Structure formats: structure tokens, C-alpha cells
Image: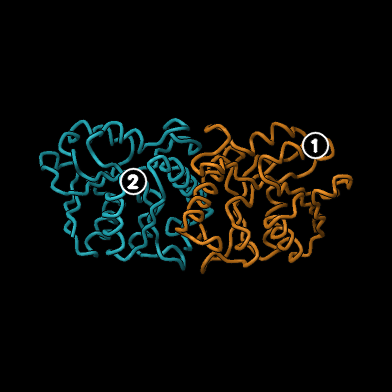
Chain colours: A cyan, B orange
Amino acid sequence: MSHVSIIGTGNMGQAIAGVAGKGGHTVQLLGQSDSATAVTGDIVVLAVPFPAVSAVIAERGDTLAGKIVVDITNPLNFETFDSLTVSADSSATAEIAEALPASRVLKAFNTTFAATLAAGSVGSLPTTVLIAGDDADAKSTLAGVITSGGLNAIDAGPLKRARELEGLGFLQITLAASEKIAWTGGFGVAA
Amino acid sequence: MSHVSIIGTGNMGQAIAGVAGKGGHTVQLLGQSDSATAVTGDIVVLAVPFPAVSAVIAERGDTLAGKIVVDITNPLNFETFDSLTVSADSSATAEIAEALPASRVLKAFNTTFAATLAAGSVGSLPTTVLIAGDDADAKSTLAGVITSGGLNAIDAGPLKRARELEGLGFLQITLAASEKIAWTGGFGVAA
């Protein structure tokens, strides 16, 4: 049983809250008006757009020490939809991990659209959440929350693999934005 | 009706030959002992490992002018399985396109394992081939071969997107090599 704090009340924050709740975990959902409320979860999901992450870290970073921090961002250039805003040999997650050296930072949920988290399926495949990070125990704890909520979880490797997960998330968003796939579809994983 | 030359007789070359044949297209399959045989296809698939591509280009590059050339490679460091061998802001396809300025170079087939090309499905989803390139007509021609062979095809964007396709192929190979998924599975696309 985990206690999950989710910072951000958009589609993704709500969908992740739904998964955790379905799994019997307690959820603290924090919006912009909750800046005075302390984060209480042992798992903290940063469910805000990448440009907003630095403000969250500036405000709450010290209180995230020791916690599992989950980065779900896709750091797209939303003006061009043609590149990421992090350098090609890095990732949003690597930048966040550098800013939160005392936290156990993971990448997850950036390759699953909110609708597929809620539905539990991507087309005819069960929804699979890919997790990257350097802390095996943290990945295992997060995978437990995900699978208890009815989804699949795969350990996709070290934190370095966040770069490929962000490439995948970027590609998936461009396909949906150009109507090649639906926002209810995307990449499913056949094990 | 296209005429497809496939250079390379490994699993992928054979699987792509099967797709083209199923679609009613004629196929020329060229192995290492066929170096004296001229390439006759209007579509030429480079179905060799990335380190072998430069030798093919040195040998046959001049004869590929004007043709649609399809790069299917995943330029992994196969010693570490932890990185690609092309620079982070480039791609194997970009390097091949630079070496073949008179050809119409596309990326395709690098995100589908041979088994899913042959089976026509990734788990319960139909197999989808993602195509990237800057020549819309060339992409459309290749997509026609793929769909006539019973698979789905999606235009994934400009040649620049080959970088994300190679990241996806890299990720998929690492998942299979670490037995998180099977070589008969992988990423399916739900439209």
C-alpha cells in the first residue's frame, strides 16, 4: 500500500490518480491552489507540463528528499511540434534528477495517453506503463502501484533510457496531433 | 505494382520480401554472393546491419540514383546495448541520405521485428510499419507496397523523425534482449 501525491490536476494527473485509487492506494491530488499544502506521499508524481516543473522544484524540492519522484513529461517544443526542448543527449528526467539529487527520480507514464490509462487498454492491448530509472526498489514500488491498478508495467532500464521514452512520447504526440492515430490510441506493448 | 530489390537475406530481408510478394510486387533478393548482379528495383531496401551499409553504398551507390532507398537499420552499439552509434542529434537514415544525395531515402521497418512482419500482427494489433522521410511520393509508394502486403503503414513525418524511430527500435531491442518482451511482440500501434 503506497501513498501517492500527484502535483497537477490535468488529464494525466487525474488519470494517474484513478489508477492508484483503483489499486487501493491513497492519493493526494494537489492543484495550483494547494501550494501551501505539504506533500505527504512517498511517491510524488510531477503531473505538470515540463516548463512548469522547475517552479515546482523551486517551491517543493527540499520536501521531496528521499521520496520517489515520477517525471511524466514530454518536453516538446509545442510551437513547432518538431523537436524536444532538452538537448539531444539528455532528457527531461536527467535534468530533474540533477535538480533533485536527494530524490529517487523515475520516468514513467509519458508514453501512455491519459485515455489509455483510464481505459486500461490501447486498442486491443492492455495498457503498459514503461518505467526508467536507476533505483530498482523505486521502480518496483511504482510498478506495484501500476499493476495493482490494473495496468501492465515494464522496467525499461536505467534513467538513461528516459531519452528513448521521451522520443517515443514525442513521436506518439506528433502522430496524434497530425491525426495519424487517435488520442485514445497510440503505442501498445505486446509482451 | 512495384519492383522491390532487397539487399540482405537475413530475417528482415526475408520478411520484407514476404510482405512485398504477398502484395503482388516483384522482388529481387540479393545476398553477399550477388555483388555482380545489378539492382533492378525502383524501391531498394538496405536490409543489412548498419555497419555493413557503407560498403553497400560504396559498391552500389551510383546505381541507386533516383531510386527509393529504404533504411531499416537500428544502429545499436551491440557490445553494450546501451547506446546508438550515431550522434544523438542525427540518425542512421540522415547519414545514409547524406551519402546518397541523388536517392529518395526513407526510414521504415526498423520498429517492427521480423516475426511481426511475417505474422501480420503484434499481439492482438495489426502490424504497423512507420515510415519517415522528406519525399511524400516515395513514402506513399512504399506505404502502398506495405498495405498491399496486408500490413498497416503510417507516415511518421519528415526524415528528421528517423531519430525517434531509431530510438523506438533501440528501446524495443533492449526490451526483447532483456526478456521484458518477446522477439515476436513489441510495440503495436492502435490508430
Residue at the image position 37 percent from the left and 56 percent from the top: A129
Q: Position of residue A174 (x, y in %)?
A: 49, 46
Instruction: In this rendered view, identify the residue nearer to me: A142 or A184.
Output: A142
Three-letter amino acid code of the residue under disc 1: Gly
- Quadrant of the rendered image containing residue A76: top left
Is B65 rendered above or below residue A131? above
Asked whether the beta carbons under mark 1 and mark 2 sit within 8 Å of each other, the answer is no
Residue at the image position 70 percent from the left and 58 percent from the top: B16
Q: Position of residue B151 (x, y in %)?
A: 64, 63
Chain ID at mark 1 = B
Is A134 rendered above or below residue B28? above
- Quadrant of the rendered image containing residue B126: bottom right
Instruction: In this rendered view, identify the residue nearer to me: B133 or A107.
Output: A107
- Quadrant of the rendered image containing residue A162: top left
Three-letter amino acid code of the residue under disc 2: Ile
**Residues tagged by mark 1 and mark 2 found on one chain of the structure:** no
Chain ID at mark 2 = A
Judging by the rendered image, the residue that carries numbered circle 1 is B61
Q: Position of residue B156 (x, y in %)?
A: 57, 48
Instruction: In this rendered view, identify the residue nearer to me: A123 or A160.
Output: A160
Judge from the rendering whether residue B61 lies leftward or rightward of residue A47; answer left or right. right
Q: Nearer the viewer, mark 1 or mark 2?
A: 1
Q: Residues within 10 Å of mark 1 (few under 14, many from 20)?
A: some
Judge from the rendering whether residue B61 lies leftward or rightward of residue A66; answer left or right. right
Q: What label sits on residue A72 in the rendered view?
A: 2
Can residue A188 be spotted in the picture? Answer: no
Q: Position of residue B120 (x, y in %)?
A: 62, 66
Q: Secondary structure at mark 2?
A: loop
The Cα–Cα distance between marks 1 and 2, rounded to whole angstroms, is 44 Å
* Residue closest to the far front: B79
Judge from the rendering whether residue B150 lies leftward or rightward of residue A51; answer left or right. right
